[in-house]
Image (spheres, rainbow, N blue to C red):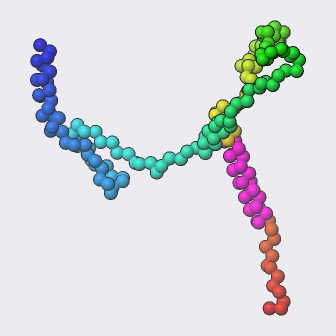
Amino acid sequence: MMLVGLPVALAMLAPAAEAQPPAAARPAGSANSCPPPDPASTTIVICTERPNGYRLNPDLMEAKRGMRSPGRPVRPGGGTPRPDCATVGPMPCMNAGISLLAAALTAAEMAKRLASGQEVGSMFLTDPQPDEYHRYLAAKARREGEEAQKSADAKAKAAAAAEAPSQPTPQPAGN
């Protein structure tokens, strides 16, 4: 029963689809004009002003440039042998496990920080590097500082020019 209704529904919708006018295109020469809406049409026309382009945030771009990898990361402890290690054979010295004294000191420092309401995540950063957001903030502060310095220099120069006595320049007597 359902399969019989599908071709009938498609046959009824086909003339309605053919009767619809094509989507109205804006004339090429009129950037600010929009065609008036047609109440009989089911076509939706959206008119907007085309942006003049976009401007990338220079602070964000500087932060992204700073995030690029400077090269291969250096591993602490590299491959240099420890002088307190006497080995026989090709295998280097190995640590026998974690230092229980260092673990106890770390736990005590964590408890001290938590008791005073501080964060403990910074204790576990082995190679602290600023993320992209902090690099953006630094770039923004640097740019704003440079702009403030330029405006202060311009104000000082204008004040010096205004305070300078406006005396006529002496002319040479020989001419």
Can see residue 118?
no
- Asked where in the image residue 161 lies, by quadrant, the reply is bottom right
Q: Which one is in front, 86 or 170?
A: 86
Residue 135 position, x and y percent, is: 67, 36
Say if the magenta span includes residue 153.
Answer: yes
Q: Is residue 9 left or right of residue 101?
A: left
Compared to residue 5, the image places residue 133 above or below, namely below
* Residue 47 seen in render: yes
Query: Secondary structure of the magenta portion, mostly?
Result: helix
Left or right: where 49 falls relative to 18: right
- Which residues lie in the magenta part? 140-162
Q: Quadrant of residue 87?
A: top right
The percent coordinates of residue 6 (x first, y second) are 14, 21
User: Depth check: 13 or 67 in front?
Assistant: 67
Kindly identify the residue that appears in the image at 81 percent across and 10 percent down.
99
Q: Residue at x 86, y 16 (%)?
A: 85
Which quadrant of the figure has residue 1?
top left
Q: Is residue 18 above or below residue 89?
A: below
Query: Is-magenta flag for residue 51?
Result: no
Q: Quadrant of the C terminus?
A: bottom right
